[in-house]
Structures are given as C-alpha cells and as structure tokens.
Amino acid sequence: MIASESLPAQFNVASWFVDRNVAEGRGAAPAFHYEGRTLTYGQVQELVNRTGNALLEIGVEPENRVLMLCLDAPEFIGTFWGAIKIGAVPIPTNTLMRTADYLYFLNDSRAKVAVVSAPLLAEAAPALAEARHLKHVLVAGGAPGPYLAFEDLIGKGSTSLAAAPTSRDDPAYWQYSSGSTGFPKGAVHLHHDMVVCCETYAKQVLGIRPTDRVFSAAKLFFAYGLGATGFMPMSVGAQAVLYPHRPTPEGVFEVIARFRPTLFFGVPTLYAGMLAVKDAEKRFDTSSLRLCVSAGEALPDELFTRWRERFSVEIIDGIGTTEIGYIFISNRPGRSRPGSSGVPVPGYELAIVDDEGHPVARGEIGNLRVKGDSTMAYYWNKHDKTKETLFGSWIQTGDKYYEDADGYFWYCGRSDDMLKVGGIWVSPVEVEATLVRHPAVLEAAVVGREDSDRLVKPQAFVVLKEPASGGDTLADELKAFVKDKIAPYK
C-alpha cells in the first residue's frame, strides 16, 4: 500500500482517528473503558481537543516534541492525539525505566513539555529537574507537586480545535527503540504510518470490526500496545480497555471475564503464565474471545497448542518492530503453522539476505529485510544508525530468519546479542555491567536460556571475588541489587 494513492497530501492523522468517528455518527458509541467508567467517541474528541488547546496555551508549536510518561489512562489518549492534532510530536515513553533513562529521552528529544502520570513522578522527578530543554510539566491523576495539574489545565481548554494543516509525510510521533550498544534510538513515524498499519494488519489479518472489544496486556508505550489499544480499534469505531496496572496472569483473566473482549493481545511469557493458573478455564469465562494475538517474542508451538486445547481459541503469532510500526509477518486464523511467525502481511514485502545484502536460497538462514509504507522515516539524530538500518525503501530488522517451502517464515534469533524477555529487549551487556558493580562480584556473563516453556530468560554466570561467600543468600542479594539499579524486567 502506498499512502500517496489513498490519502490526501494535506492530512492530519488525529482527524482520521478521532474526528472521523464523530463525523460518521459514532459520537455516543463507547471507545475506551477505564477504571469503572466509559469514554464515548464524543468524549474522546472533547478530551483530545481540550488537551491540544492546553498544549497550545503553554506554548507548544508544530514539530515540538511532547514527552509522554503516561500509564494506560485517559491522559495518554488525550495527549497523544491532542499533540498530533496541533502538529506537535508526542513521544510515548517506557514507564518501566529509571531516572537516567528519562533524562536521556528528555535531552535527546529536546522536549519542551512532559506529561506524566502521577504514580510515575517519583522516578521521573530528578530527570524533569535536570532536563535542559523542558519548559513545562503536566501531572495527571494525582498531586502535581511543583508542576501543573493536567486536569486543571485541560479543564480550561476549549472543546473545539481545528486540526493543524499537516502533511501525510509530516512527523506524527516518535518511539524509542533500544539496541545492544549505544543509546536508545528515536524512530520517527509519519502521519500516514498508523493508517497503513490499520489498512494492512488490522483489517486484512485480524478482520477488525466495529463490534470488537480489544484488551491488550502490552502497554500503550510499546508499538505493539499502541496499535492494539491506541489506534487500531479507533480505525473502525471499536472499543478498547485501558488497563494501567501490571498485567499478572490472574489479573488478566479477571479483566477478560469482566470486560468480555473479543480480541486479546499478549506476549508468550504472559500466555505461559496464564496457562500455569490452575483451573483457569473453569474459574474464568473467556468465551467472548474470538482471537488472541501474540508478538514481542517467538511463540513456542506447545504454548499455541496448549492454549487452544484449554481455551478453544487460537493465538495468532506474528512479528512487528517499533521501526515498522506494527506486525508485518503473521499467521492467519485457521491457517497457523505453530512455531512460525507466519506469512507476509498484505502490503509488506520480505527478503532474506546474507551479510552482503544478496538474497539467500529458500530454506537458508539470513538477515530479514522488510519493505512497507509504515516504516519509520529515520532515527532521530542517529545518521549512521539510520544508514545501517535503511536500504532505500527496505529496512533490515536485525532478525535472523528462513523461509520454508510453503512461504512461512521461521525466527532464528537476533543478529546481535540482544535478548527478548517478556516481549522487551534486554541487553546482556547492561546487566553484566550492573552486576560487576556489586562489591562481591569479580566478573559476570549474561546469556539467554530457555525455560521449561521454551521462552528465553536472562541467566547470569558470576565469578566472585571470594568464592567461599557464594550461596542462595548472595544470589538473592545480587538479584535485588540489579533490580534496584536498572529497569526491573531486565
């Protein structure tokens, strides 16, 4: 799909996702369910317009970056679409990171404004105080401290807002993508990119429809969660559940039983945890689900089989990246090949090449390249990394794959040493560097090891300065030490 063939040159994607639903008569239809209340599409439009006007009031201009450190809550929806509507560029940011990470994101993006959910303020506050370009901080959902109260500011904003006259090729939003070396990279996405993801994966793989209700365990700050909750349901006027809490297996089952979603998005690690819940199929009603989706890491075939046998619903596995915006290889309902990533999503071309960029024979392992119109424009302020990743209209994902005789693609690992744990990239180097800061540790090496469900988990091998001091107590102490220094999921 080529955006220029279907979208006008002047195009603001917030109007397409937000205003269009109201214009087409869905203003009173439910859009988001959050903590016991429901936001209609008309209320979403009002929230977006008020937020956009509030941002204008404090001096946000077109192309200014707005850093979002937001839980899956109304402030995320209002800020993301409100910023885009005024021509600014929201940056959804990982809520599991540490102060030093947030300072890097703020300084690298040169964000003038940050919108922060109150529960995240304690970790973010030191970074907010040091950020060089930051002018205003809006705090939502709690005491703002020395900052502006999000609710107070948007409460004063007008409910009317004309969309900025942006181009379909203007920057719309960024998402930071981590790598095994160096700092995270800001992937710059354009106004047409989300529409492409909806017209390809959402419509042609999921068959998403207005009667669907979506629940994603993956959070909105992930590309996976942003599509699942933040824009794909809105493409057809469907509903989504905003869930700001940690997605434990029991908690996820409770949400499914309560809200009765038709589509559920998870990662293999979570599916394994849910399968470990005793008598879950008897305790929780999952009959509303017509389809489950998996991405973030490869789904082992036994998890696919066990889930289908216990819950009578299929998990559709696929692969997407932050840089491409959403899933570009996927299995199909009723045509899954367990253990594979599936076949190309309509609108995307795939190639497997050797290290010199030459195509390899079918069945041989090589580097995956993808061509599709939702791919990022470039990495912000990372010229060399952009050149290493983009090859004309193709992007090299960093994944090793092979294609079988039937056209299914099989994941074989990363081209670098990154581990994907619970759908999130983990750098062994970062964990090793943290471990050796402990006074008892001489050397450390971290590798990926498959657990009993064939899911990758980081395992550390540690050489102690005093070998006799080893034992379970020190092992627990080292785990706590690392968890305190870097993002806990690592």
Image: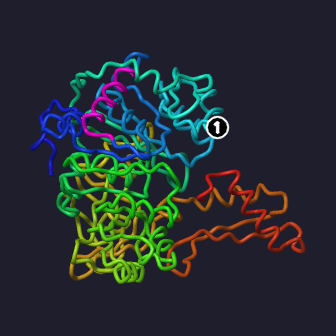
What's under tag 1, amino acid-wise?
Answer: Ala
Against 279, residue 11 (above or below) is above
Against 479, residue 273 (above or below) is below
User: Picture coordinates of residue 187 (x, y %)?
Assistant: 39, 44
Against 191, residue 456 (above or below) is below
Q: In this view, does 348 lie to the left or right of 432?
A: left
Q: How many labels does the image show?
A: 1
* Residue found 32% across the figure and 35% down from its top: 81
Residues 212 and 364: in front is 212
Q: In which quarter of the image is the C terminus?
A: bottom right
Residues 373 and 22: in front is 22
Residues 354 and 220: in front is 220
Residue numbers of the magenta segment: 39-55
Q: Is residue 253 left or right of residue 44?
A: right
Residues 339 and 391: in front is 339
User: Picture coordinates of residue 366 (x, y %)?
Assistant: 36, 71
Q: Name the residue under label 1.
A: 122
Predominant secondary structure, magenta span:
helix
User: Picture coordinates of residue 322 (x, y %)?
Assistant: 38, 52
Query: Which residue reaches farthest left?
Result: 5
